[in-house]
Image (cartoon, grey):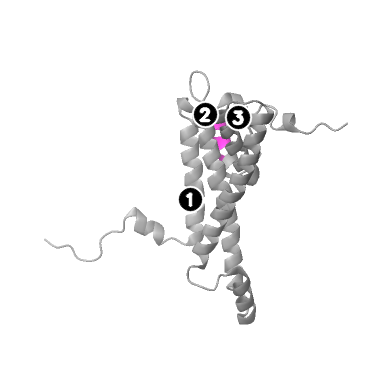
């Protein structure tokens, strides 16, 4: 027996039919919920037991929103697994903010007069159908390049300046490079980076 009419859309089709603003908001909510769930796992917390729901939720939202606010010591409370989760939340949240701001700029450009749109498109290279994708790829490329350069500098500092094990120094360098580029404020030292400040006089 054949069914009439269109089949009910799957989750992917339903997602693609949503307004871009709803997709951005939904993706952000999903990112926070996944981060919260991962930080609730016992493997994410030092010692026995799991983090409380408020500690995990606050940390996940703070990392994804790149606010830098913490209710526990990131260096001592979270395991390496938990710190990796926080790092990914910072990276995805920071990139999301940059992409969202860029898309707002694109939407504004589309509301300008024809002459202004031509000028802006020539300056920003948004004059093709793949303009949005080009912007996203450019943001990602710039972020990775800057974070890589900063990570190399910090690696040399932590390895040669502080005498850290090379692998640990690399992890510290990557975490703090991502955190600083995305303006997150998270650190893997109990005093944040106060111990790294230069001594004058």
Residue at x 65% of width, y 40% of height: 153
Residue 12 against residue 53 in the figure, above or below: below
The answer, for residue 186, to whether it is visible in the render is no
Q: Quadrant of the N terminus?
A: bottom left
x and y percentages locating residue 75 in the rendered image? 60, 27
x and y percentages locating residue 95 in the rendered image? 56, 51
Q: Quadrant of the C terminus?
A: top right
Q: Nearer the viewer, residue 78 or 5?
A: 78
Q: Nearer the viewer, residue 146 or 18?
A: 146
Q: Which residues are magenta?
A: 52-61
Task: Report which quarter residue 76 is drawn in.
Answer: top right
Residue 106 against residue 35 in the figure, above or below: below
Residue hosting label 1:
27
**Badge 2: how crowded within 10 Å, few (<14), some, or many (20+)?**
some
x and y percentages locating residue 34 in the rendered image? 46, 40
Which callout, 1 or 3, points to the residue nearer the camera?
3
Q: Secondary structure at mark 2?
A: helix
Asked whether residue 58 is drawn in magenta, I would say: yes
Which callout, 3 or 2, points to the residue nearer the camera?
2
Residue at x 57% of width, y 73% of height: 110
Q: Which mark is residue 74?
A: 3
């Amino acid at each position: 027996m054949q069914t009439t009419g269109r089949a009910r859309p799957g989750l992917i089709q339903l997602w693609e039919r949503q307004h871009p603003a709803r997709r951005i908001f939904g993706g952000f909510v999903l990112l926070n919920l996944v981060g919260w769930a991962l930080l609730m796992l016992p493997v994410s917390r030092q010692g026995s037991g799991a983090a409380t729901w408020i500690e995990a939720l606050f940390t996940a939202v703070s990392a994804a929103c790149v606010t830098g606010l913490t209710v526990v010591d990131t260096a001592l409370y979270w395991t390496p697994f938990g710190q990796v989760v926080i790092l990914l939340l910072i990276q995805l949240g920071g990139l999301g903010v940059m992409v969202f701001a860029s898309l707002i700029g694109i939407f504004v450009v589309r509301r300008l007069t024809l002459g202004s749109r031509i000028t802006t498109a020539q300056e920003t290279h948004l004059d093709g159908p793949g303009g949005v994708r080009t912007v996203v790829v450019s943001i990602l490329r710039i972020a990775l390049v800057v974070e890589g350069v900063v990570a190399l500098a910090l690696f040399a500092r932590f390895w040669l300046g502080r005498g850290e094990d090379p692998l640990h120094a690399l992890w510290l360098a990557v975490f703090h490079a991502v955190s600083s580029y995305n303006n997150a404020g998270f650190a893997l030292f109990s005093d944040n980076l106060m111990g790294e400040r230069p001594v004058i006089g």
